[in-house]
Amino acid sequence: MSPTTELAPAGLAPADEPRTLVQDLTRGDRNFQRIATAAAATTLAVMGLIALFLVVQAWPAISKAGFSFFTRFEWGPDDDPAIYGIASALGGTVVIALIALVLAVPVSIGTALFVNEYAPRWLRSPLVTVIDLLAAIPSIVFGLWGREFLNTPISNISRFLAEHVRFIPIFKTDALFFGNSYLVCGVVLSLMIVPIITSVSRSVMTEVPRGHCEAALALGGTRAGMIKSVVLPFSKGGLVGASMLGLGRALGETIAVALILSIDNRLLTNVVQPGGSAVAGLIAVKFPEASTNGRSALIGAGLALFIVTLIVNVGARRIVGRSGKAVRSGKAS
Amino acid sequence: MATPLTPAQAEARTFHPASDVPRRIRNFTTREVTELIAFLVFAVLVTLALFAFTPLAGSFGFVVVAYLLFLATYFIAERARGDRQVGIDRVVTVIITSAAIITAIPLILIVFSVVQRGLRGLSLGFFTETMEGIAPDAPSTDGGGMHAILGTLVQVLLATLLCVPFGVLTAIYLNEVRGKLTPIVRPIVDAMSGVPSVVAGLFIYSVWVIGLGQGFSGFAASLALSVLMLPTVARASEEMLKLVDPGLRESSLALGSPQWRTVVQVVLPTARAGIVTAVILGIARVAGETAPLLMTAFGNDRANPQQTLSEPQEALPLFIYKQVTNAQGSAVDRAWAGALVLVGLVLILFVLARAVSKPTVKR
């Protein structure tokens, strides 16, 4: 220590120590904390109970079917002997969600970039409102609209694809009818997941250090160059996470799929012909008229869906969180 | 890259002191807009010609071909005039702007078709009559959705009453109490917001409907909806509590008031508008849920708000679903009328949330 800093009178030094803080809660405070803790614990418990009760109620069906529950395609829990498996449903769910993701991710990231980097200031908040409104429209309305207004145009496109783009296997079919297909579901679901991907992408992009962006522009870069060299590298991880959150939504979407897909328990290799299956849609369609055994099997399907979406969502949150932390510490992910 | 600059590029890169004004990167010049429109018109005209003289057809194909043609010609033209980077920048601007337009179009189309088709089936009777004793093939003017509207109101109200105390207290736990469970509770609440609604329905079916043998009821639907609402309310309220100025909290504590008084009399009133907004948005989210109602409320053709605890009950989304799937063409009109009422309800909640949040929360 240099001598110049020792100017303070030696006698005052001991008084300048921080005093020890003693936290002595009143009875009211202890009760308050207990109540809040109980509420938080209830929230935790609900999540645990979901898993527990789904397992308990699905057990009769799953134990009867054994591992074939995950490998069989047919759904006939009330047949004699009962046959049921979710292989086709799981496959269909994944295909539909992937179609939705492929369509929604570019549009969402573009929209997020537009709102953050391109839109004039007066246009920003109306655009955010539009995205929020899109998120607020109930899925039953999306389903109804898709079934009545989107099915025919997409059938026409499907016919064109099936006739002229046959060399791509997912469009290759000999079917005479199109529509009520994976593709129609995927398109409708993509509209439904655009809001969540856009808003998460936007919040990730807002974290990109503004100084870096301005530096890129000051060096004479164009906006496209700035986005390519600063915004996207910094927010890459967060964008992956945002897309996964969208995937989670698409996997769990039920009623729009139930209204649009004509469920027939096949696993189709093309996306344009009617038919196929999806876990959530299967549950919604079969539940009302199912018997006890059928409902137990459907709860099993719900359990599988729960586990898959849980993994996707928790993974997504971790990626978004980690990317945010990396950006704040100044490293591009 | 040592390629010699073209005169145009050299000009673009020369420093002109007179032009040393801030870059207005968000502004468009008149020339840029004119060029854009000119190339767009050009692309449309060429596509029209293409579609007239070749076997190409279909409106979707038209849009795709015209758009690609527009991008290609626009890029070539901009690039020919100056820098390659400028050409790329212009095309990227167009692509990103189109993405935003693509996002807005479905909303407009959906709202338009819901209003148009909904008004066809909507009459005063829709608000005063039920589906009791209405044949499946009856004309759409017979019967109505009064029972469904009542059911939705009762179920959503009960769900709100069940969920809000837990949601707000969980938020208080996360932001004010900050107990040992905080690092577990927050990710679990996040994970819960990703639970598919149909799984929440199956959960309440497993616990309440068959587990405890209570049977299908409107109350079971409220339970499922509150499970779905809880994470929305908890996380949004937590964000609102975070916005409360720490100075306020510390002043209150420094004046000697215990923590619970600080929370009840200082923190919560300050965050009230934000929390109300969070709750309204939570309500708007669950009011349109259909899947969980299939296995909890189950549906009913008559109005029974008094038997919410004991009998299956109708709800608007369920009503729409049943009208679309169960019956003849005439019922679809009823479904659209229901959709119009439902969208109206959600929009009112949405506007309400905006109005409440305006004075206190500024972004």
Image: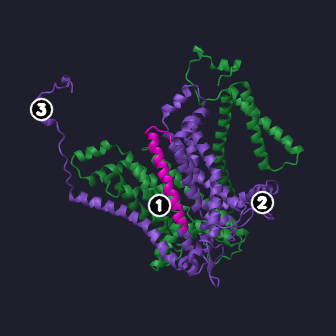
Gap in Å between the C-alphas at discs 3 and 2? 88 Å
Task: Residue A167: name its quadrant.
Answer: bottom right
Q: Position of residue B46 (x, y in %)?
A: 83, 38
Element under label 2? loop
Q: Return the residue at label 2.
A: A172
What type is the residue that disc 2 sits on?
A: Lys
Name above or below for residue A133 compared with residue B88.
below
* Chain A visual colour: purple
Marks 1 and 3 in Cβ contact (< 8 Å): no
Q: Which chain carries label 3?
A: A
Q: Would you call the spot at circle 1 few (<14 residues within 10 Å), some (14-19), or many (20 or more)? A: many
Please state the horizontal and vertical placement of residue A101, each as a whole percent of the image. 62, 53
Please name which of the two marks, 1 or 3, marks the residue nearer to the observer: 3
- Of all chains in the rendering, the one displayed in green is B
For the point 75% across and 36% down, which residue is it? B72
Q: Are marks 2 and 1 in one subunit?
A: no
Q: Can residue B144 be seen in this view?
A: no
The residue that appears at 80% across and 55% down in the rendered structure is: A160
Bin the neighbour count of mark 3 within 10 Å (Cα to Cα): few under 14, some 14-19, many 20 and up: few
* Colouring of the image: by chain
Q: What stretch is highlighted in magenta?
A: A304-333
Mark linked to residue A12:
3
- In the rendered structure, are the residues bearing label 2 and label 1 in contact, judged by CB atoms less than 8 Å apart? no
- The alpha-carbon separation of the residues under discs 1 and 3 comes to 56 Å
Tell us which disc is closer to us: 2 or 1: 2
Which numbered disc covers residue B192?
1
Question: Which residue is most to the front?
Answer: B2
Mark 3 vs mark 2: same chain?
yes
